[in-house]
Image: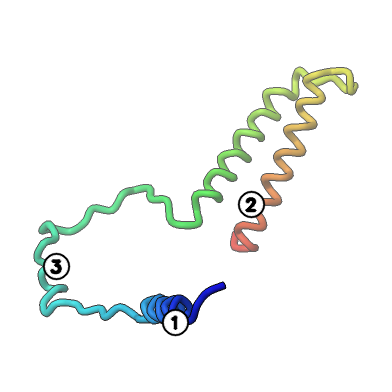
């Protein structure tokens, strides 16, 4: 069992820890900080890239590229596909068609009707 001195010491340490955790840091921005940052920037107008990936558009770009690739694969497989499930080309063509439908559905959900 703990004696009263140990208990008091633990209680005091707990209060110090809680006080330290609840204390908010004091933030201070030095005078003229924004002006110094602007002066540190290189002179001239920033060049815009002709193709920039915006946040949230990378998934749409990849989905569109996948849809185009799958559509091209359908055209390549079409002449080789027989009309039986024993034909490997026919099976692959069906799989590509299902994948194309899934990519189209995902792209439609991403765009949310903004076509």
User: Which residue lies at the image location 69% right of the left edge and 28% below the top edge?
Assistant: 75
Q: What secondary structure is marked by label 1?
A: helix
**Sequence-first tag of 2 and 1:** 1
- Mark carried by residue 107: 2
In the picture provided, is 34 more to the left or to the right than 8? Answer: left
**Sequence-first tag of 3 and 1:** 1
Residue 14: percent from left, percent from top: 44, 77
Label 3 sits on residue: 38
Q: CA distance from mark 2 to mark 1?
A: 63 Å
| Quarter the C terminus occupies | bottom right
Q: CA distance from mark 3 to mark 2?
A: 41 Å
Q: Total marks drawn?
A: 3
Q: Nearer the viewer, residue 53 or 1?
A: 1
Residue 8: percent from left, percent from top: 44, 82
> Few, some or many C-alpha atoms within 10 Å of disc 3 (few <14, some 14-19, many ≥20)?
few
- Give yes or no for contact between labels 3 and 1 (Cβ–Cβ under 8 Å): no
Label 1 sits on residue: 8
Residue 79: percent from left, percent from top: 75, 20
Q: CA distance from mark 3 to mark 1?
A: 54 Å
User: Which residue lies at the image location 66% right of the left edge and 58% below the top edge?
Assistant: 109
- Give yes or no for contact between labels 2 and 1 (Cβ–Cβ under 8 Å): no
User: Which residue lies at the image location 64% right of the left edge and 62% below the top edge?
Assistant: 112
């Amino acid at each position: 069992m703990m004696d009263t001195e140990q208990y008091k010491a633990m209680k005091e340490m707990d209060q110090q820890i809680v006080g330290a955790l609840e204390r908010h840091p004091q933030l201070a921005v030095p005078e003229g900080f924004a002006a110094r940052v602007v002066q540190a920037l290189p002179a001239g107008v920033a060049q815009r890239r002709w193709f920039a990936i915006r946040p949230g558009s990378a998934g749409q770009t990849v989905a569109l590229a996948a849809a185009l690739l799958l559509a091209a694969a359908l055209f390549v497989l079409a002449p080789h596909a027989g009309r039986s499930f024993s034909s490997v080309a026919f099976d692959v063509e069906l799989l590509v068609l299902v994948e194309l439908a899934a990519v189209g559905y995902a792209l439609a959900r991403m765009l949310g009707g903004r076509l």
